[in-house]
Amino acid sequence: MAFTPGSRRGAMADINMTPLIDVMLVLLIIFMIAAPMMTTGVDVKLPESRTGRNLESEALTVSITFDGRLQFGQAFMPLPVLANQLKAKAQSDGKRPVLVRADHNVPYGRVIQVVDAIREAGFTQVGFVTAAAPAAPPIDLR
């Protein structure tokens, strides 16, 4: 294949968009699958309650896993670190409620330690996250 002076190829003027669109669609699918996993935090089996209200959008949340590990925000931490972070948050956001998401198998004493740390940090509104119980007939207290 010899070079001939009369056969000059010009620069390619347009970009092939098909590979770019393929990559973008794959990324979109990955983010659609990963996004719900990132917002739920740790997997905790919650106790059930027939009464209650939804405070999750306005509250801070502390999660306690079945093995007693603590999560605040996106990080796991020991109780003393959690207490320090809560104290720092209470300086600017002390009026917000704090919700405790504890697995139903967590020992009661561990939950009380966390609630004490929340109250000692300066928060006054502490609530517990529960799963909605199936509809049950009202209890007759006569």
Image (cartoon, rainbow, N blue to C red):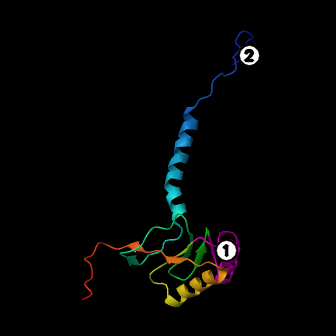
Q: Which span of residues is magenta-colored? A: 75-96
Q: Residue at image x 27%, y 87%?
A: 141
Mark 1, secondary structure of its residue: helix
The answer to which quarter of the image holds residue 131 is: bottom left
Tell me, yes or no, whether the highlighted magenta stretch contains residue 95: yes
Task: Check residue 90 in the rendering and tell me which mark sits there, or answer none.
Answer: 1
Asked if residue 95 lies left or right of residue 142, the reply is right
Q: Residue at image x 70%, y 12%?
A: 7
- Foreground residue among 116 and 138: 138
In the picture, the quarter occupied by the N terminus is top right
111 w.r.t. 30: above or below: below
Mark 2, secondary structure of its residue: loop
Measured in 3D between alpha carbons, the distance from the residue under mark 2 to the one under mark 1, in whole angstroms, is: 76 Å
Q: Residues within 10 Å of mark 1 (few under 14, many from 20)?
A: some
Task: Kindly identify the amino acid type of the residue bearing the numbered disc 1.
Answer: Ala
Q: Is residue 64 visible?
A: no
In the image, residue 58 lies at what x, y percent?
Answer: 55, 65
Q: Is residue 16 visible?
A: yes
The answer to which quarter of the image holds residue 51 is: bottom left
Q: Residues within 10 Å of mark 2 (few under 14, many from 20)?
A: few
In the image, residue 118 lies at what x, y percent?
Answer: 61, 80
In the image, residue 123 lies at what x, y percent?
Answer: 61, 77
Q: Which residue is mark 2?
A: 3
Task: Kindly identify the amino acid type of the residue bearing the numbered disc 2.
Answer: Phe
Q: Residue furthest bottom?
A: 109
Task: Check residue 142 in the rendering and tell me which mark sits there, or answer none.
Answer: none
Dominant secondary structure of the magenta stretch? helix
Which label sits in the foreground, 2 or 1? 1
In the image, residue 59 lies at what x, y percent?
Answer: 55, 68
The answer to which quarter of the image holds residue 85 is: bottom right
- Foreground residue among 63 and 127: 127
